[in-house]
Image (cartoon, rainbow, N blue to C red):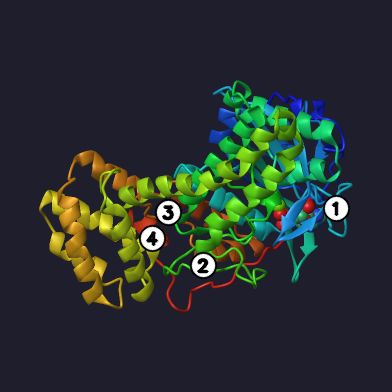
């Protein structure tokens, strides 16, 4: 049993509106995350039929008080004053085993007062994609919302074509976004804004409460988490795809996995999302966009900072500029790990820059490259099979001469730091299995036809991302030319 609390409901409306889910025709459980449920304090697992009732919204779990949350947002740079949960409902918060308050949210559970033209539903494909990618992120330690359940509805939703519907249950540190602050700010509702900011400080950034200027400290803390988050994404080749301010979590978690994808062949300008025609959210644009989103956040805090004094307002731009330095520091650390170098190594940055050029020009798969480099580093240390590991690495590029020259420089830098922990950190920084686009598409196609077995197989693999078994290696392989999926759809 989950013990629900409702702290968000102490905030004034219209930050939230009570709303009941719309029942679905035939709920049946596709997946349930037992480990996460246990973390949330669920001692015994109810039977599948009960879980399907609860997590479709047909019969709410005891203690749930569903509400749709209001938010605004900049979508592809254009401000929309009212978005809000158009198909999601917060059931309540659960304090987990570590004492951390978590939101539990249904998505696709029917229309809400914020729905505008939408049907309030979610297509199965989108639900499975989010389940796989968010659970992979959790497995590699990237801050993220989690997937607690997926329930098929037995109904069809019409998008590009009719497809089966599903309701995912998502667990988050909170669903408060930059857009939530924009929602209060655009209404000039200063008391709601202040209540929201104070709620966020208490819930996510308690240390800011003791700072001299709490709202400035809040901006700084959110900036730090976003900078670290985007650096983590990029170290894995992750492209979020819709970094609108309404998809930017104040708690610094990855949220709203729409058309996201992991880059295969390295390309700094890579875009997968079919709707991102201006390439606004291309791989390398992500830090700049995060900083832009934070500037929108800072604007919403101005009325509160003004009360702290003009000097505080004047410091805000400096705090925002601090993003760059924080991002670079985190990236340097991650790059050193990926290359098996000491965190303070001066070689990490130039070596990574040169390797990115090699990966780009040599059409190398990013994940496979770092996996092979890890094997090569391990072989060099053990003094065995280094030659064949080097060959395996060189087989990944169309320009072996360039990579050979790069490897010579890397080996020199690496020799200086051959401790065991370094190799372990390198392994952890370079997953073997990622949820590749074509594999996700494969499991979605099978699930649409009623077969969810491939989904469970892929889920097991991506949540053990350092497993080197034969099955893991099969799922880890980059797409062949004909398997490549180059476009992803929002699939809302
Ligand atoms: P998203 O693309 O999921 O980040 O959603 C952007 C906005 O569109 C949010 O306000 C959603 O609630 C709303 N939205 C997306 N899909 C639907 C839908 N099927 N029905 C109602 N609202 C939706
Ligand atoms: Mg969203």
Q: CA distance from mark 3 to mark 4?
A: 10 Å
Q: Position of residue 472 (x, y in %)?
A: 38, 55
**Quarter that holds the C terminus:** bottom right
Q: Is residue 320 above or below residue 94?
A: below
Q: Quadrant of residue 397?
A: bottom left
User: Which element is circle 3 on?
Assistant: helix
Up the image or down, 489 lies above or below 345; here it is: below
Q: Which residue is mark 1?
A: 115
Q: Residue at x 53, y 34 (%)?
A: 35
Q: x, y percentage for residue 129? A: 60, 56
Q: Would you say the beta carbon of the disc 1 residue lies within 8 angstroms of ligand 1?
A: yes
- Mark 1 or mark 3: whose residue is earlier in sequence: 1
Please name whichever residue, 47 or 237, is drawn nearer the observer in this view of the structure: 237
Distance between mark 1 and mark 3 Cα atoms: 36 Å
Cα separation, mark 2 vs mark 3, equals 20 Å
Q: Nearer the viewer, mark 1 or mark 3?
A: 3
Q: Nearer the viewer, mark 4 or mark 2?
A: 4
């Amino acid at each position: 049993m989950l013990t629900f609390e409702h702290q968000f409901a102490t905030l004034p409306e219209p930050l939230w509106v009570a709303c009941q889910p719309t029942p679905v025709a035939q709920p049946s459980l596709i997946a349930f995350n037992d480990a996460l449920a246990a973390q949330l304090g669920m001692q015994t697992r109810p039977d599948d039929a009960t879980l399907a009732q609860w997590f479709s919204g047909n019969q709410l779990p005891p203690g749930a008080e569903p509400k749709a949350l209001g938010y605004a947002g900049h979508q592809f740079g254009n401000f929309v004053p009212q978005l809000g949960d158009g198909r999601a409902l917060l059931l309540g918060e659960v304090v987990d085993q570590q004492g951390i308050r978590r939101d539990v949210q249904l998505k696709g559970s029917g229309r809400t007062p914020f729905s505008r033209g939408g049907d309030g539903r979610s297509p199965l494909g989108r639900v499975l994609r989010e389940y796989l990618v968010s659970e992979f992120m959790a497995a590699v330690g990237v801050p993220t919302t989690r997937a607690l359940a997926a329930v098929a509805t037995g109904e069809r939703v019409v998008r590009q074509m009719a497809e089966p519907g599903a309701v995912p249950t998502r667990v988050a540190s909170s669903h408060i976004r930059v857009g939530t602050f924009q929602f209060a700010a655009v209404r000039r509702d200063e008391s709601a804004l202040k209540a929201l900011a104070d709620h966020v400080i208490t819930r996510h950034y308690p240390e800011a409460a003791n700072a001299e200027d709490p709202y400035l400290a809040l901006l700084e803390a959110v900036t730090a988490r976003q900078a670290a988050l985007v650096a983590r994404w990029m170290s894995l080749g992750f492209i979020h795809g819709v970094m609108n301010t309404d998809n930017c979590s104040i708690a610094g978690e990855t949220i709203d996995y729409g058309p996201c994808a992991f880059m295969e062949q390295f390309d700094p300008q890579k875009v997968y999302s079919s709707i991102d025609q201006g390439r606004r959210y291309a791989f390398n644009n992500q830090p700049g966009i995060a900083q832009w989103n934070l500037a929108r956040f800072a604007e919403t805090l101005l009325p509160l900072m003004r009360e702290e004094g003009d000097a505080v307002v004047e410091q805000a731009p400096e705090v925002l500029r601090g993003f760059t330095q924080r991002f670079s520091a985190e990236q340097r650390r991650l790059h050193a790990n990926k290359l098996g170098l000491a965190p303070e190594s001066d070689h990490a940055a130039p070596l990574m820059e040169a390797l990115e050029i090699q990966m780009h020009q040599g059409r190398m798969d990013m994940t496979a490259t770092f996996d092979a480099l890890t094997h090569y580093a391990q072989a060099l240390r053990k003094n065995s099979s280094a030659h064949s590991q080097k060959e395996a690495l060189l087989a990944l590029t169309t320009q072996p001469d360039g990579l050979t020259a790069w490897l010579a420089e890397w080996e020199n830098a690496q020799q200086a730091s051959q401790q065991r922990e370094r190799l372990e950190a390198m392994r952890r920084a370079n997953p073997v299995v990622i949820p590749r686009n074509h594999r996700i598409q494969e499991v979605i196609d099978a699930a649409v036809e009623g077969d969810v077995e491939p989904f469970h197989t892929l889920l097991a693999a991506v949540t053990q991302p350092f497993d080197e078994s034969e099955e893991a290696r099969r799922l880890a392989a980059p797409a062949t030319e004909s398997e490549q999926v180059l476009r992803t759809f929002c699939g809302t």
